[in-house]
Image (cartoon, rainbow, N blue to C red):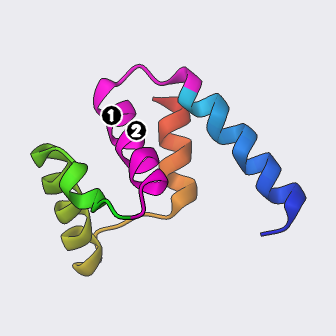
Amino acid sequence: MGTAELNKTKKELVGWIQSLTDDSILSLLNSVKLSSEDKSADWWEELTETDRINILRGIKDYQQGESMESSEFWEGLNNG
C-alpha cells in the first residue's frame, strides 16, 4: 500500500471510528490497539468471550464458503 493510499485509509478509518456507537465494536478495536502497543500481550486473551465466539464463527463461515466481498460488507454497513 502506497503512502497516499495508506493516508486515505487512515482518514476513512478515523471517520468510521468517530461515527461508531456500538460499545462492543469500540471495545474490540481498543483491544486490538492495546495488543499492538504491547507486543508481549496475547491479543486473543484480551478479547471478551463474545468477541472470541464471533471471530471463530466468522472463520467457520469463511471455511464453509459463507462469506461476502468486502465491498458488499462496507456497502451494507454504510446503508444500515
State the residue position of label 2: 30
Local SS, label 2: helix
Q: Quadrant of the C terminus?
A: top left
Q: Looking at the magenta stretch, what is its main secondary structure?
A: helix
Tell me if residue 55 comes above or below residue 12 in the rendering.
Answer: below
Local SS, label 1: helix
Q: Which disc number belongs to residue 46?
A: none
Residue 60's image quarter? bottom left
Q: Residue furthest right?
A: 4
Q: What is the crowding at mark 1: few (fewer than 14 residues within 10 Å), some, or many (at least 20)?
A: some
The answer to whether 45 appears left or right of 30 in the picture is left
Residue 25: where, in percent of width, then height? 35, 35
Q: What is the crowding at mark 2: few (fewer than 14 residues within 10 Å), some, or many (at least 20)?
A: some
Q: Quadrant of the N terminus?
A: bottom right
Give the Cα separation between the discs numbered 1 and 2: 5 Å
Q: What's the residue at 70%, 39% (across, down)?
A: 12
Q: What residue type is disc 2 on?
A: Asn
- Was residue 33 drawn as part of the magenta stretch in this picture? yes
The answer to whether 28 appears left or right of 20 in the picture is left
Residue 61: where, in percent of width, then height? 23, 69
Residue 42: where, in percent of width, then height? 27, 62
Q: Nearer the viewer, residue 80 or 7?
A: 7
Residue 11's image quarter? top right
Q: What's the residue at 52%, 59% (across, down)?
A: 70
Mark 1 and mark 2 in contact? Answer it, CB < 8 Å.
yes
The answer to whether 71 appears left or right of 21 in the picture is right
State the extent of the magenta-drawn residues as a range: 18-39
Q: What's the residue at 46%, 46% (across, down)?
A: 33
State the residue position of label 1: 27
Q: What residue type is disc 1 on?
A: Ser
